[in-house]
Amino acid sequence: MSKERTWRKPRGGDGDYNYRKQPVFPKAGKTQEGELSESNNLNESPVKEARTSRKGCCLATAVSDVEGGDGLQLRKEHTLKIFAYINSWTQRQCLCCFKEYKHLEIFNQVVCALINLVIAQVQVLRDQLCKHCTTVNIDSTWQDETNQAEEPLNVDRECNEGSTERQKSIEKKSNSARICDLTEEESSKSSDPFGLWSTDEKEKLLLCVAKIFQIQFPLYTAYKHNTHPTIEDISTQESNILGAFCDMNDVEVPLHLLRYVCLFCGKNGLSLMKDCFEYGTPETLPFLIAHAFITVVSNIRIWLHIPAVMQHIIPFRTYVIRYLCKLSDQELRQSAARNMADLMWSTVKEPLDTTLCFDKESLDLAFKYFMSPTLTMRLAGLSQITNQLHTFNDVCNNESLVSDTETSIAKELADWLISNNVVEHIFGPNLHIEIIKQCQVILNFLAAEGRLSTQHIDCIWAAAQLKHCSRYIHDLFPSLIKNLDPVPLRHLLNLVSALEPSVHTEQTLYLASMLIKALWNNALAAKAQLSKQSSFASLLNTNIPIGNKKEEEELRRAAPSPSPSRACFGN
């Protein structure tokens, strides 16, 4: 009698007997997210039949069924099931389907097919955005031409007939072009392999590929438990290919991870995504897809060396920041948008620590956050503005001589702060105590550059008269007064002196004493500077004969000694 099943009595002891089931991963018979359904048709998914080592041969059969002439070809249902499997990996981490090495190679082919599928999808999206951008430009030029044709002309009848004929020809051109656009759209929809994909499904595909560039990916764990090829085991030719993008010094990085990064970058995946941001807007490029793009890029960026970051990531950030600046305030409040902004703000900081530049794109995005009605977003924007000023001050303090580049950057920073009315926005109607606490760096920078005017002092002083924030504004003055020019100093002293005696407080009296002391110090410093200049000028005007030491000694002895009264006056 053959025993097909083994059974045991449960420890609960209620009299029923349960069959001992074989370990299965993923669970069969369910189709929710994170689990794969069992089916007899092997064409439905290239990985779903590889649940145990006993069923590993089924995965190879499935892959061979969907493999075409150009390699492995995945359909939408394959991709979604792979995405569900990868998402369930963090909870399950079962390696039963990878006990045989051939299953690892099959999964490797599936991963390469996923990367190729994403690159093809991004290329289709890039082409669509390019067409939309060109048609919008053509429509705008046609609109200009029709507006010129519709202008009233007080000329002869022949000219009027010529203008009407021209207008008719323009209308015919526009109609024919729009008909061509419609036919192109219909043909593109029919030829677009991703036309049936929804935005959520495209996002899942991108997020699935983003997980490939994380070190926790299931394939890397499976390779580590079965076979463990490292960077030291590859040929010199492959090492040079991988070294074109990746840092080859860390031998602990999985070799297949570096290969996937080079596959994505070598097929211009980053360049295609950059073009999508360049030609796209929040209306044509959905925010879900844009955030998925940034997730892929941020995961790839970890494994790139600095020259690759300079070549591929730095040009990327300009268009991403412009895209973020076009988002609405409600979209910017999402955590995904904040993550994108933080990544773009930090992109330049790491590879360009030694290079100083005026980063207008980052400042524009920071100002958009600063102008939000939400306090958290305003603080985030103000923090990024002050970070740029801190970076500038650190570079200037580390160098003994200030170069022309630093002077021009300081002027550009000050011009940007003045043109965007940052001081007026800080102390204006929407002032907040937390914003006031964080603005010391901006005020000190403008004062040191001599760009804090009397109008700014009036705005600050008006806000200082409000009871709920007066104390916090007076706390800004001790550090600010050290950098102020004499003109705004005297103006602020006049404002304090104009107060009624009954209105004065301990803070206003302390402020008046600091202003008087600062004005006296400035006057004494200016006098000392003038005396140095005059003494230096008198030294240059004296005709001292140039000769040997003996002649100089004789001249000194022959010269009459000054009288005591004259010497005292000179002192």
Image (cartoon, rainbow, N blue to C red):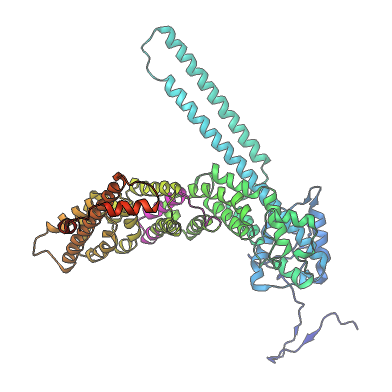
State the quadrant of the C terminus: bottom left
Quarter the N terminus occupies: bottom right
Provide the residue span drawn in magenta: 351-379
Residue at the extreme right of the image, as rendered: 1
x and y percent of residue 442 in the render?
34, 56
Provide residue 303's location: percent of width, then percent of height: 64, 60
Q: Could you say which is closer to the camera, residue 47 or residue 273? A: 273
Q: Residue furthest left?
A: 501
User: Is 450 situated left or right of 233 in this image?
Assistant: left
* Residue for point 20% across, 57% down: 519
Estimate the x, y position of residue 127 in percent, counting from the top left: 62, 40
Q: Is residue 410 magenta?
A: no
Q: Quadrant of residue 350?
A: bottom right
Comparing 329 with 88, the one in front is 329
Count of numbered labels shown in the rendering: 0
The image shows residue 194, relative to residue 514, as above or below, that is above
Pick whichever, 542 or 238, lies toward us. 542
In the image, 164 versus 421, the foreground residue is 421
Magenta run includes residue 365:
yes
- Return the x and y of residue 307 as percentages of the image width and height: 62, 53
Tell me if I can see residue 31 in this picture: no
Q: Is residue 136 visible?
A: yes
In the image, 483: left or right of 410? left
Residue 384 lies left or right of residue 234; in this view the side is left
